[in-house]
Image (tube, helix red, strand yellow):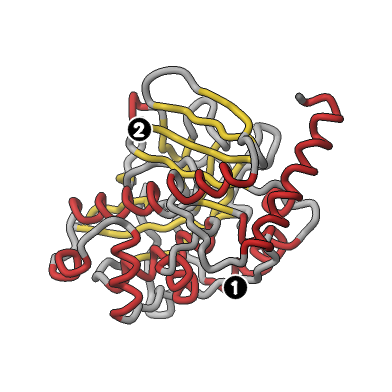
């Protein structure tokens, strides 16, 4: 299986970022902007960038609950992230692709498909954006936009990987010539398929609009914040915080109220939301509480 598609001159490439955004972005990842800008692309740097992004820039849909509108421009997404915000796959991977381009990595976009539940259709449905790069002749899969996906970049070689070999990459059965990522047991999704063929923002725009605006979309219906760190996974869905450490038992508990929700967002998920008026965030929390109460009335407590 080839690691990347045959690339022609017309293949869309992410644009570069200006110096101010790159500096703020790298600081957001907990990295030294001067040192990272001075280093040539390397496997070690790619791991630092990817792991820092997954751990410190959360997958979140608070922005959707706030009624914000975002497009598919990776430069605009990078500015959001550099300013302390998060996003979901299109923004997270889109911004990351622009950062990598700026640092000298050849990055390719792929129309991908996340299978959230076992009954969901596999294949490159377009509900996800996947990235690949080539470094020293070797292909890598990059994904900072899965929430509880891999912490590190993944070599495009079939096999198990990650902590205790919990993840698996293999040839896709639904996408000819493509790849299949099988998530760890108990994860937030079943898996993801992506082709070696390339895509561009315009090809994903309709699905992005659907996922971020349709009343039937899970992104619209449930306010979620997720990230993975070297210690494990943390996820907020509504007012429920779940933690899956690499070692030990998983825990699930309800957040006590608005003050704790804001504190956890800021201190745990690196999502301060200081640019959002307090009354707007309180309105989101009131909605979360109302949704949770309805969920309990339906017998899910």
Give the mark count.
2
* Nearer the camera: disc 2 or disc 1: 2
Give coordinates of residue 90: x percent, y percent.
Answer: 53, 62
Q: Quadrant of residue 70?
A: bottom right
Name the image quarter holding residue 276.
bottom right
Residue 71's disc number? 1
Q: Is residue 137 left or right of residue 206?
A: left
Q: Which residue is mark 2?
A: 231
Q: Label 2 crowding class (10 Å Cα cut-off): few <14, some 14-19, many 20+?
A: few
Q: Residue at x 50, y 41 (%)?
A: 172
Q: In the depicted view, which residue is nearer to us: 171 or 49?
A: 49
At which x and y percent is residue 119? Answer: 70, 34
Label 2, secondary structure: give it.
loop
Q: Nearer the viewer, residue 50 or 300?
A: 300
Residue at 48% x, 37% y is 234
Disc sitting over residue 123 in the figure: none
The percent coordinates of residue 21 (x first, y second) are: 35, 75
């Amino acid at each position: 299986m080839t690691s990347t598609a045959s690339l022609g001159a017309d293949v869309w490439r992410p644009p570069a970022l200006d110096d101010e955004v790159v500096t703020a972005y790298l600081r957001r990842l907990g990295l030294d902007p001067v040192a990272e800008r001075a280093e040539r692309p390397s496997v070690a740097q790619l791991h630092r960038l990817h792991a820092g992004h997954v751990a410190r820039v959360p997958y979140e849909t608070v922005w959707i609950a706030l009624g914000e509108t975002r497009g598919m421009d990776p430069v605009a997404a990078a500015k959001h992230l550099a300013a302390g915000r998060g996003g979901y796959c299109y923004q997270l991977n889109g911004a990351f692709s622009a950062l990598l381009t700026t640092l000298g990595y050849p990055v390719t976009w792929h129309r991908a498909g996340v299978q959230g539940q076992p009954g969901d259709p596999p294949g490159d449905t377009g509900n996800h954006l996947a990235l690949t790069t080539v470094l020293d002749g070797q292909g890598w899969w990059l994904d900072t936009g899965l929430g509880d996906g891999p912490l590190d970049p993944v070599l495009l070689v079939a096999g198990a990987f990650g902590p205790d070999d919990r993840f698996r990459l293999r040839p896709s059965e639904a996408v000819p010539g493509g790849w299949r990522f099988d998530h760890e047991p108990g994860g937030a999704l079943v898996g993801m398929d992506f082709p070696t063929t390339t895509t561009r923002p315009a090809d994903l725009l309709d699905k992005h609009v659907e996922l971020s605006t349709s009343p039937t979309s899970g992104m619209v219906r449930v306010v979620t914040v997720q990230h993975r760190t070297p210690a494990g996974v943390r996820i907020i869905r509504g007012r429920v915080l779940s933690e899956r450490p690499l070692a030990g038992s998983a825990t699930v508990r309800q957040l006590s109220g608005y003050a704790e929700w804001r504190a956890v967002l800021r201190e745990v998920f690196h999502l301060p939301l200081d640019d959002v008026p307090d009354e707007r965030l309180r309105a989101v929390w009131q909605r979360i509480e109302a949704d949770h109460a309805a969920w309990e009335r339906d017998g899910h407590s």
